[in-house]
Amino acid sequence: MTIAPSAPAAPFGDSERGAAALSADAAPWEAGPDDWRHIARELADDLATDAVEREQAGKPPLDEVARLRESGLLTLLVPAERGGGGADWRTAYAVVRTIAAADGAVGHLLGAHYFLSYCARFFAGPDRAARVERAFAAGQWYWGGGIASQEPPLMLTPTAGGYLLDGHQCYGSGVGVADRLLVRAAVPGTGEPLAVLVDPAHPGLVGGSSGDTFGRRLAAAGGVGFDAVPVTRDDVLGSLSADDGALSPYAGLAAPTARLVSAQFCLGVAEGLLGEVREHGRTVNPSWESFPPQPWQGHAPQDPYVLTAYGELAVTAHAASALADQAVAALTRGLAQGEDLDDEECAQIAVLASAAEAAAARAAQDITTRALDAVGAPAAYARHGLDRFWRDTRTHTLREPVAHRLREVGDYFLNGAHPPFSLPA
């Protein structure tokens, strides 16, 4: 695990293997996992240069999404034969974590996009998923919205040529900047929840309201209304039913896939703050005074109290990271099995992902609080912007309480109960 950011790299726009090398028009080289990580680090370095100013301004992240698009990262998970980057989830998670360490809101935007844009593979048939991904790669769409299980479904009324979508979604990620929205809707009568793809340019979409939150201020999240928005039959991807047997075990992997996006976001934000305070701790006197005449007085790197505080934070980050890596490895194996995956294997992956999300959330809350203690009073200065790490973490974890994940893990441990199919916000 990398606790501190890598050494400064050249500005993203100057990279020889940056946006130009990965544009849709020309790809003179085939990107591998290391290449994507390199591109993510360069973009993270670029975002970090003005992260505090952008976060405090709180403007819609149009420029940030444009940077993601230019980098080629938006289509990272689309197979190469469909016009995308051809990477796997292990690489995508590493990219989300790297971006979140520099700018939590942008990391969240990207993580939500990866999950939502991958849902065609979970819930649609192979042919429809291929058509969606080809159109996505050609248009370089940014995906927003949300299909959370706790979100009341919109109503999808059949018409002669398709459907009309009505209702209000209380919360969606990136709704203010998305090229496509993936939402949860139900057909009157049966009430079966469905995943529906919506073009925000259609008439009847009541503009996405900006979420009034103290953290993740650049995630363009909030509510959005739908008033007789037209939807084609091809835009209805498939069922989101939690009923037993309604979804295949492979489709059931959607939940742990999303939970590990959440875990990587938390780890990225925690590691981003650790990198900031480490540089502070190397150069600034300790935030608390040692008892004289101790030899380490005035030298933070030698103060045993400071060293112990940083050591505890580093151990917390390492432990949560190791569990997340284990869960990612299990998910990768499960995705590779495809429709050969069985219910018990899916449950094991889901439990491990829940445990990883819980550990990452707790680690991020602990680190983003106690790391500020290590810095001391200067951590309160707005010009440093260290509070954004804590605010981003708390805004995120309030939507995904750790208690629910711990209950799932405990029920499986004691009773062998499979976690319910529940998609996070």
Image (cartoon, rainbow, N blue to C red):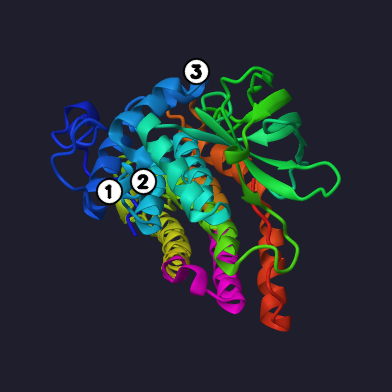
Q: Nearer the viewer, residue 87 or 190?
A: 190
Whether label 3 touches label 2, CB < 8 Å:
no
- Nearest to viewer (mark 1 / mark 3): 1
Residue on which the image places disc 3: 57
Q: Classify mark 2: helix, strand or loop.
A: helix
- Within 10 angstroms of label 2, few (less than 14), some, or many (20 or more) residues? many
- Within 10 angstroms of label 3, few (less than 14), some, or many (20 or more) residues? few
Highlighted range, magenta: 333-360
Question: Callout 3, which amino acid?
Answer: Ala
Could you tell which of marks 3 and 2 lies nearer the N-terminus?
3
Q: Is residue 94 above or below residue 156?
A: below
Residue on which the image places disc 2: 98
- Within 10 angstroms of label 1, few (less than 14), some, or many (20 or more) residues? some
Could you tell which of marks 2 and 1 lies nearer the N-terminus?
1
Question: Callout 1, which amino acid?
Answer: Arg
Question: Callout 2, which amino acid?
Answer: Thr
Residue on which the image places disc 1: 37
Q: Does the magenta stretch include residue 349?
A: yes
